[in-house]
Amino acid sequence: MLKISGFANLPPMTRTRKPAAPAAPAPQTPPPAEPARRPRGRPRKTALEIDDGNRRRALMDCAAELFLTQGYAATSVRDIAAAVGMHSGSPFYFFKSKSDLLHAVMHEGMLQAELSQQQAMQALAPDTPIAERLRTLIRHHFEVLLGPRSGFIPVMLYEWRSLTAVQRNDVSGIKDRYEAVWAPVLEQLHAQGALQADPGVARLYIFGALHWAVQWFSPRKGMTLDQLSDQAMALFIRKD
C-alpha cells in the first residue's frame, strides 16, 4: 500500500475553542422617577372651564338687564336663554331655577362691590384725611351704581322682595359688611364737626341719595362721576 509520506509525522489535530464572549451586563433598573411637582397657586382653568365661566357670566348679565326692563315675574328662563343665544334648557346647567339666577345676580354683584371697595380703601395712604376717605367711598359707590358692571344694583332695588327669605339673608350679610366700612368714617367726621347729623342716620340718608342717582344720572348730560362725587361731598360734609 502506498504510504503518503509525511502525514505520519504530523501531530494529531486538535480543535481549538474560541474564547467565550464576555457575558452581557445585566440590565440596570432605572431609579424611580420623581413625582411631578404640583405648581404653586390655583391650578389653571381649562378651556372648557373658562368657556363655562363666560357663558355663566353672560347669563347673569342678560338676566339682570331683562329683570330690570321686563320685571322678574314677566321674564322667563326661555327669554334669558334666547338673549344669550342658548337653547331654552341650557341655563339649568348653570342655575337650578330662575330664582337661583336672580340670587346669583345680587350675590355676586355685592361680592364684587365689596372686593373693589376694599381695594379702593387699601390704595389710600395711611395719613389720608378722613374727608377724602369718605369721598373715596362715595366715588366708588357711584362706580358700583353707574359703572359698567352696575346691572345688579337696579335689580336689588326693584326685585329685592322676589328673593326667598334665605336668599335675602345671604345678600344682606354681604351688604351689611359693605356698609359697615362707612361707619367709622362717618363717626370721625361727626366727631370733627364736619358731619352734623347722627352718623347712623346720615349713612341711611347718604345711601338713599346716592341710590336715587340711578334714576336721573346720565353721562350725556356732561357731568362725570368725579364731579358727581364732589357735589355729594358738598351736600353732606360741612367745610370750615
Image (cartoon, helix red, strand yellow):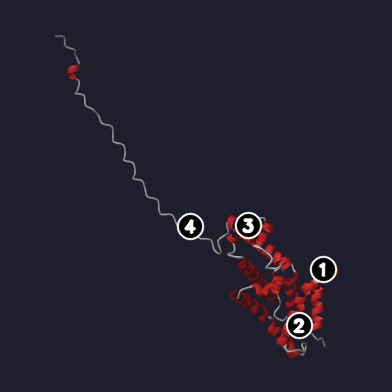
Residue 197 found in image quarter: bottom right
Q: Which residue is tagged 4?
A: 36
Could you tell me if residue 119 is visible in this image? Answer: no
Mark 3 residue crowding within 10 angstroms, few (<14) / some (14–19) / many (20+): some
Crowd class of label 2 (few under 14; some 14 to 19; many from 20; radius 10 Å):
some
Query: What amino acid type should be assigned to the residue bearing mark 3?
Result: Ser
Q: Which residue is mark 3?
A: 88
How far apart in space, not on screen, are marks 4 and 2 (Cα)?
54 Å
Residue 121 lies, with reference to residue 42, above or below; the image says below
For badge 1, the amino acid type reads Pro
Q: Earlier in the sequence, mark 1 or mark 4?
A: 4
Q: Earlier in the sequence, mark 3 or mark 1?
A: 3
Question: What residue is shown with label 1?
Answer: 219
Q: Are marks 1 and 4 in contact (CB under 8 Å)?
A: no
238 over 103 or under it: above or below: below
The mark nearer the N terminus, 1 or 2, is: 2
- Label 3 near label 4: C-beta < 8 Å? no
Mark 1 vs mark 4, foreground winner is 1
Q: Is residue 36 left or right of residue 111?
A: left
Label 2 near label 3: C-beta < 8 Å?
no
